Image (tube, helix red, strand yellow):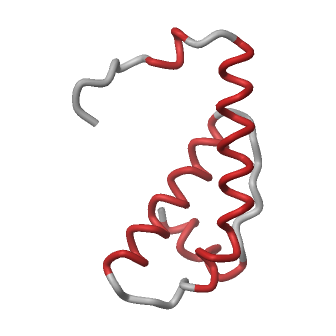
Amino acid sequence: MTGVDDAPLQTLTQRELQALRGAAVWYAKYHAATVAAHAEERAADAISEREEYLDLVAALHKLGVRIRVPDALVEMASAA
């Protein structure tokens, strides 16, 4: 992203960070089934959606949050 501070998390309060974490967890859980349903699709938008989803799961992992990766994406997640 251009024009974005390199260290935006440092400017967040604990409550703001918790709210961001909570929203990301909700989003990841809400979209898990949809992303998994399109796991075999080769269309560019499906690939991009999977990559973004797995990036979100990886970022949450770094924040100490474990999200179960759908079985259809497990192999892709370990390759990332």
User: Which residue is depicted at the point 65% across and 44% down?
Assistant: 24
Is 55 above or below relative to 32?
above
Residue at figure coordinates x 54%, y 60% from the top left: 53
Q: Is residue 76 above or below residue 11?
A: below
Q: Position of residue 3 (x, y in %)?
A: 24, 24
Relative side of 43 to 8, left or right: left
Q: Report x, y in % for residue 54.
A: 54, 60
Residue 57 percent across, percent down from the top left: 62, 52
Q: How many marks?
A: 0
Q: Is residue 30 above or below residue 71?
A: above
Quadrant assignment, res 22: top right
Task: Look at 55% across and 84% down and name the residue there.
Answer: 39
Q: Nearer the viewer, residue 63 or 35?
A: 35
Q: Quadrant of the N terminus?
A: top left
Q: Toward which corner of the image does residue 7 lie, by quadrant?
A: top left
User: Where in the figure is residue 70, as x and y percent of width and height?
Assistant: 71, 73
